[in-house]
Amino acid sequence: MSHAIPTVVIVGRPNVGKSTLFNRITGQRRAIVGDEPGITRDRIHGLAEHEGRRFEVIDTGGILIHDQEYIPVQILHQAEMALKDAAHIIFLVDGHAEITASDRDLASMLRKLGKPVTIAVNKIDSAGREVLAHEFHALGFPEVCAISAEHGTGIDALLDSVTAGFSTEPPEAPPPETGIKVAIIGRPNVGKSTLLNALTGMERAIVSPVAGTTRDAVDEKVVRNGVEYVFVDTAGIRRKGKTHDMAEKLSVVMARRNIRMAHVVLLILDATEGVVALDATIAGYAHEGGRAVIVVVNKWDEAHGVQGKKKLDFEHEVRDNFKFLEYAPIVFLSAKTGSGVRTLFPLIKEVYESASKRITTGELNRFVEHLHFEERKIFYITQHSIRPPAFAIFTDRRGPLHFSHERQIINQIRKRFGFRGTPILLQTKAKGKAAKR
């Protein structure tokens, strides 16, 4: 997000309703919401507007100041990074509960920042309960608002307080989105967040040895050699039936949504575990969505050093299990050490350009003249869309081509025009008398 507009950061201990408030203010279901504490772990960004004042909103994970467990410490670290640039802080507390030690610890931390803070007392869903909000003045901040994030009560008054000092003049129009959107997908604990951090050169996502640490999608922009890349680290996708709690199920839905919105997908495999059935299922999501795909074999330093695996053998294993991804290049790297990570940037650009390539009808007509195909007569071919490249084939007979014949034509299109890393779609149409029958 651009920082040309003010930033509002929502903080609070776990399960007080931060993600519900974030979604209410931004008007979208960008963050996962549920009754389970600790659902949001990374910081999530969104844009909002109130009374002509535009601002950025950041939802942070539930903060526990003195919890030394790995995940809470990392959540605190992520929140502190967001708070550095905050123009205003919304300190969200639970109106159904008394002030807790965690609330007091967080209030103490916020006072030291010297930034404007508004306390939002959540879950005040009736006029009779508004009196409960007054006790939170004890946390030491003058601005206290009673709200119900779920029902929308008190949100306007809260935003009046938060945005009072913000300009109503529209910010400079942001440049059009030109970046290559890259979704990082894979099973839990294969190193997706570690790879994001290696690609961006900063600790953007929480990284931990605990499987399933990332639940929301986290994105970061990187400019390299004049090309902008937008990386999205998605939640680890589990097999159906393994996603018992609601947060994990919603994570799968949102991860698949990010796949559909991406231009390029990095499918991460764990070299130490080899290819498993779930890897093929996840790869199928990217292929079915028509995304350009790069297969990234992570932890290769560990597999090669301990198990003595050879790249050629592993590549054969991948090709045998992912026959539908024969077009996807395979990269071996170590996100942890950074070995091989830099090779991803030019490769992402290459497969993106392949997926975005358009072939003129004239070039395709010349291709048809030299096309060796005997199953039926092809009059001409046109390309009607990109990402993925899709072609209409006009023939002398109705009905789709046999799978083997379709594959033959696709292979010859690749041989002539490239299209590395992207699926190709074919649509068969009858021409002339065959179309009238």
Image (cartoon, grey):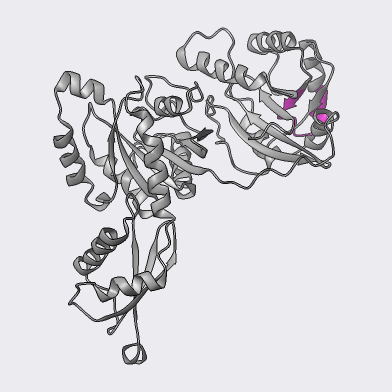
- Of residue 434 and residue 410, the one placed in the foreground of this image is 410
Residue 241 among magenta residues? no
Q: In the figure, is residue 117 to the left or right of 296? A: right
In magenta, the rendered stretch is: 119-131
Let me know if residue 372 appears in the view.
Answer: yes
Quadrant (top left/top right/bottom left/bottom right) for the N terminus: top right
Reply above or below: 28 against 79: below
Is 3 placed left or right of 367 in the picture?
right
Q: Nearer the viewer, residue 207 or 177?
A: 177
Corner quadrant of residue 212:
top left
Quadrant location of the C terminus?
bottom left
Of residues 231 and 55, the one nearer the viewer is 231
Given residues 299 and 8, the one toward you in this image is 299
Q: Position of residue 207 (x, y in %)?
A: 43, 21
Give coordinates of residue 409: x percent, y percent. Answer: 25, 67
> Relative to 369, is 187 above or below?
above
Image x and y of residue 142, in percent? 84, 16
- Write the residue at 39% across / 60% down: 389
For residue 24, say whether it is visible. no
